[in-house]
Amino acid sequence: MKKTVDILEMDVHWIKKSYLKSVKIHRKKNVAISAHSKRIKALAFTAEKDGVNFIAYHNDADKNYNETYNEIKSEFDKLNNFRCIAVIPKEMIESWLLADDCAYPSIPENPKLPPKPEEIWGQKDDKNSNYPYNYFVRVLLQFALPDNRDTYTYIAENSDIEVLKQRCPVSFCRFYTDMQAFVDIGHCSGIPPDSIDNAYVPPTLFRKK
């Protein structure tokens, strides 16, 4: 992603949600914890074991942005000795990828990019709906681009940060602000997960160079 931070180098250790589910964590007997809490605790345990103290956790909000963001931030507050960032699109990560016309081989026309990509929504099982993933796939089809990791990375790397802030003013602006604080320590710097070559679906660990 263009101009997210000044320095664009960081080792990244990607951790799949399926792996986090397998990590055994200590918890009080008969006390239920949320899925976010379990995954974040498992992520912190894995990070600590590897000597990593920078954590980024991604989850699509799926129409529950404030609730999701606040819950994850609350879980971060319980961790000691970790620098954490929440990567929470207001709807889905595809909404951010639908922000910048210039990130594509040419200006998308059929369909055009939505003027407010954070606001679109629709039925998941209807390929013609405005469900962000379905909309994104239709945009890719006009360029014969595959729906895979490389395409996500290509579009993210070619998206302009100022355009993203303008067209995704709720969740991306908050992520951008949080990201500046996240990297503003020592010589550590980084970029969002979708900006890194060969990235795949977070949650993820960020390791300092």
Image (cartoon, rainbow, N blue to C red):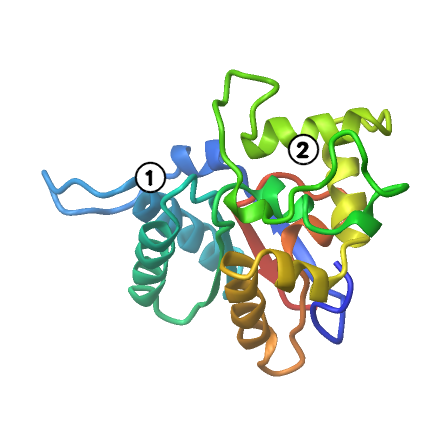
**Residue 52 visible somewhere in the drawing:** no
- Whether 189 is drawn above or below 23: the answer is below
Q: In which quarter of the image is the C terminus?
A: bottom right
Name which residue lies at 38% across and 44% down: 39
Q: Which residue lies furthest to the right in this view?
A: 105
| In-image side of 105 versus 21 (left or right) | right
**Residue 89 visible somewhere in the drawing:** yes
In this view, the mark in front (1 or 2): 2
Q: Residue 146, position in %: x, y?
A: 79, 26
| In-image side of 188 versus 47 (left or right) | right
Q: Is mark 1 on a helix, strand or loop?
A: loop
Q: Residue 202, position in %: x, y?
A: 56, 44
Image mark for residue 24: 1
Task: Please tell me in which quadrant of the rendered image residue 183 appears.
Answer: bottom right
Please, what is the three-letter code of the amino acid marked with disc 2? Phe
* Residues at marks 1 and 2, CA–CA distance in whole angstroms: 36 Å
- Whether 83 is drawn above or below 126: the answer is below
Please, what is the three-letter code of the amino acid marked with disc 1? Lys
Crowd band around label 1 with a 10 angstrom C-alpha radius: few (<14), some (14–19), many (20+): few
Q: Residue 70, position in %: x, y?
A: 33, 58
Q: Residue 49, position in %: x, y?
A: 47, 55
Q: Verify CB contact (< 8 Å) between mark 1 and mark 2.
A: no
Q: Quadrant of the N terminus?
A: bottom right
Q: Is mark 2 on a helix, strand or loop?
A: helix
The residue pinned by badge 2 equals: 136
- Whether 149 is drawn above or below 46: the answer is above
Crowd band around label 2 with a 10 angstrom C-alpha radius: few (<14), some (14–19), many (20+): some
Name which residue lies at 60% across and 44% down: 95
